[in-house]
Image: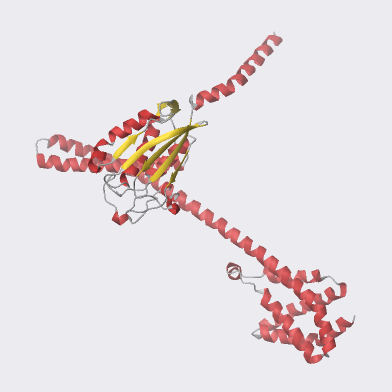
Amino acid sequence: MRVLDLLKQVRQRWVERVVHRLARGEHTRESFRQELERYLELVEQAILSGDPGWLNEILDRWISVRTQSEQQHHAASLAPILRHILLSLSFVARENLSDADALELLTAYLPLHSHALEYTSRLEGEAYVEYIASELEEARRRLERIDRSKSNFISVAAHELKTPLTLIEGYASMLMETYAQNDAAALLLKGIATGVQRLREIIDDMIDVSLIDNKMLQLNFQPVWLQQLLGIASHELQSVLQERDITLQLEDFPGSNEMIFADSERLYQAFWNLLTNAVKYTPNGGRITVSGRTLPGFIEVTVSDTGIGIDPEDQVLIFEKFGSLGDASLHSSGRTKFKGGGPGLGLSITKGIVEAHGGTIWVESPGCDEKTCPGSTFHVLLPIRKEAPNEQLNKLFRPMLMETKTNAHAGEKAET
């Protein structure tokens, strides 16, 4: 072919120009020259056969040797090389061939160049996607290890703290009995007892989080009336509500007086956390409303407040462990004081308890603003169970058990 003859006329000068432009150092130039010679051999085969796929062999090899750094920065390392190869061919062809011959040679090479660019671009993109996928998988594994370590730490720390706390509680109790007549000592010991009680609550929360994380939270299903649970929680909060001048209104909503099966202690804990959270973020003189409705198969309970609200981007974060918002250094120390501090476990535990019952929880709020106080509404969706889960399983498998017993009895008669 005439094009191959033209290529042979400029091939050596083409190689030297590309090597001189792209390679530095004698060893590097020699290695690069060998690669380029192989590339031009495949160019000849592609021109001869009319199939640009001949170039794929060496393009695959060039892509495979890209460094991790090049992949990380998505460096299109082959595109500049291919561009220099094309420009060098154009230069040596115009310098050593007639205009007509140079145009003919470039016209024959351009489809190969386009194929090389398209092919390498696709493979580099696939390699980059694969690299990103592997990095994401590694990041996921690291996050899982961190989360496991955090859960293990919470579990170990909670159990390790219980022993010394029990000792402090016991000795404080003995001292209170000994110095019961000493008003000054009794006041100090009462402060120690209050601190011990607060620490015990935090440790119990840590243990609950550990149980939820490890899917070991056990529920004791029994008949429950939501109105009774909410009424007990409201009664327990009366002193705090009066101190903060906050009104708590319990509405008689559909389903509130309906008997369902649930773990009353855990469900009370969940609603207690929601109510104390509403108290904590509602300014003095505010209002909290508990209402709800029935849905097919579910009861929805809502806890609304006239508090400072929650920004949309934080409405998932608050249900995570230690998901406190704002500057922790600005929080007050009281658990039910306005913006009171805490370890940030209450809503995480509430979410775990609700989900363990087969329900779900979410929050709605237009945003956070301490001046206008747009408020928040927490939604709790609980399944309406008319019997304990174990009883439901027994009913499900009872026909199968009866059939098995009948068949076995029939078999015994046949043998007789």
Tally the marks.
0
Above or below residue 141? Residue 358 is above
| Residue 2 vertical position relative to residue 275 in the rendered view, above or below | below
Q: Which of the 4 image quarters holds residue 171?
A: top left
Q: Position of residue 279 (x, y in %)?
A: 31, 43
Quadrant in which residue 44 is drawn: bottom right
Residue 286 appearing in the image: yes
> Which quadrant holds the C terminus?
top right
**Residue shown at 72% from the left, 72% from the top:** 117
Q: Would residue 263 appear left or right of 99 to someone viewing this image?
A: left
| Viewer-closest of 49 and 168 | 49
Which residue, as the protein is rendered here, is positioned at the far front?
372
Q: Residue furthest top?
A: 416
Which of 266/279 is in front? Answer: 279
Q: Residue at x 41, y 40 (%)?
A: 350
Q: Residue at x 70, y 82 (%)?
A: 30
